Image (spheres, grey):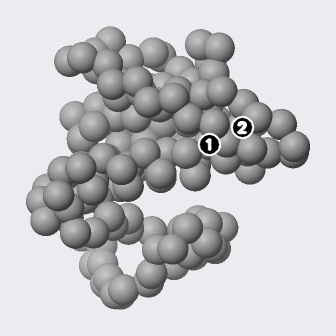
Amino acid sequence: MACDLHSQRFVKAKRVVETTVEESGPPMSAQAESLLALCGASVRDGQVLVVQREGFVLGVAVLRIASPDAEIVAIVTEPNSRHRGVGRLLIRDMVRRARIAGCNKLRIRLPRSDDAALAFFARLGFEDTHVAFDLAL
């Protein structure tokens, strides 16, 4: 799989940081794989996007495109890189990819108990559109 590099800039604490969002094909770095494992995702779940700076993985996301909608399967940032724009960078790139693919929506499923994640996605314009019920088996 060819690498699709998409350079971006994001501003945090009055400094500009160069990063890349890259579609990761095999082999993926062990650091990126371990971040994905934190949220129970794997490379088989969709397009894996990796944010790196100077070879260090700052965040990873998995995007599944199933037209007419796209779904964020997983998004996770390295703990020391949180609150620095990494998640926003990943979301921006997933929005771009979903639009290019002709999708109408970008969806993520979150537990109601994760207040920080709910607030993060609300700030980015995501809307709470439905309630899901689960039955443990």
Task: Report crowding for label 2: few under 14, some 14 to 19, many 20 or more residues within 10 A (C-alpha).
Answer: few
Front tag of 1 and 2: 1
The spot of residue 134 in percent (x, y) is 30, 78
- The residue under the point 44% across, 83% down is 128
Q: Earlier in the sequence, mark 1 or mark 2?
A: 2
Q: Is residue 108 above or below residue 27?
A: below
Residue type, numbered disc 2:
Ser
Quadrant into which the C terminus falls: bottom left
Position of residue 90 relative to residue 31, above or below, is below
Q: Is residue 50 left or right of residue 107?
A: right
What percent of the width, then of the height, locates residue 94? 38, 49
Q: How many marks?
A: 2
Task: Please state which of residues 70 and 109 is positioned toward the viewer in this rendering.
Answer: 70
* Label 1–label 2 contact, CB within 8 A: yes
According to the picture, the residue beneath numbered tag 1 turns out to be 86
Residue 89 point in image, percent of width and height: 55, 45
- Which residue, given by chain and number where applicable, does mark 2 sit on? 81
Foreground residue, 99 or 29? 99
Q: Residue at x 66, y 27 (%)?
A: 18
